[in-house]
Image (tube, grey):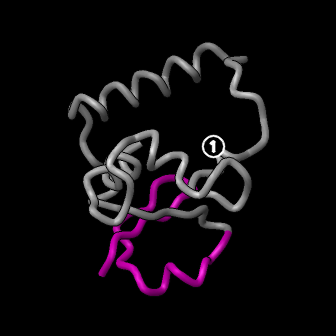
Amino acid sequence: AHVVANRVKSSRFPKTYCGVVTAGGSAPPCQFSWWCDGRPDDVVEAAPFASAREIARQVLNGESAAPTNGALFFHNARVQPSWSRVFQRTARIGAHIFYRPA
């Protein structure tokens, strides 16, 4: 959520949350795998959905500390994309590594 918010604030990306999330289209490769995974977006697990919605609300309202330290990019730790070498690593949260321009 914070990466999306950081991108909205950056001149490098679209100026809306929907624009940032849907950049690159709805088919892989895209910016966010949860957007273009080809799976239905129907809510099937109420508790995780409620948690995600609350996190989004907090980020949108500026009520959440930014754990990524300004990151605009991230990837799963199981991969090492070539682009990660040119950015400054800012955080690791669980299985994800976060970056911002150097």
Query: Is the residue 80 above or below the residue 98 in the image?
Result: below
Within-10-Å neighbours for mark 1: few <14, some 14–19, many 20+: some
The spot of residue 33 in percent (x, y) is 65, 50
**Residue at the outermost top position:** 46
Q: Which residue is drawn at 43% across and 86% down?
A: 86
Q: Residue at x 34, y 68 (%)?
A: 90
Q: Which residue is drawn at 29% across and 32% down?
A: 60
Residue 71 or residue 47, whichever sits in front: 71
Q: Quadrant of the N terminus?
A: top left
Q: Quadrant of residue 65?
A: top left
- Tell me which amino acid carries mark 1: Trp
Residue 1 or residue 36, whichever sits in front: 36
Query: Is the residue 32 above or below the residue 79 in the image?
Result: above
The spot of residue 62 in percent (x, y) is 21, 34
Magenta span has 98? yes
Q: What stretch is highlighted in magenta?
A: 79-102
The residue at which mark 1 appears reads as 35
Q: Quadrant of the C terminus?
A: bottom left
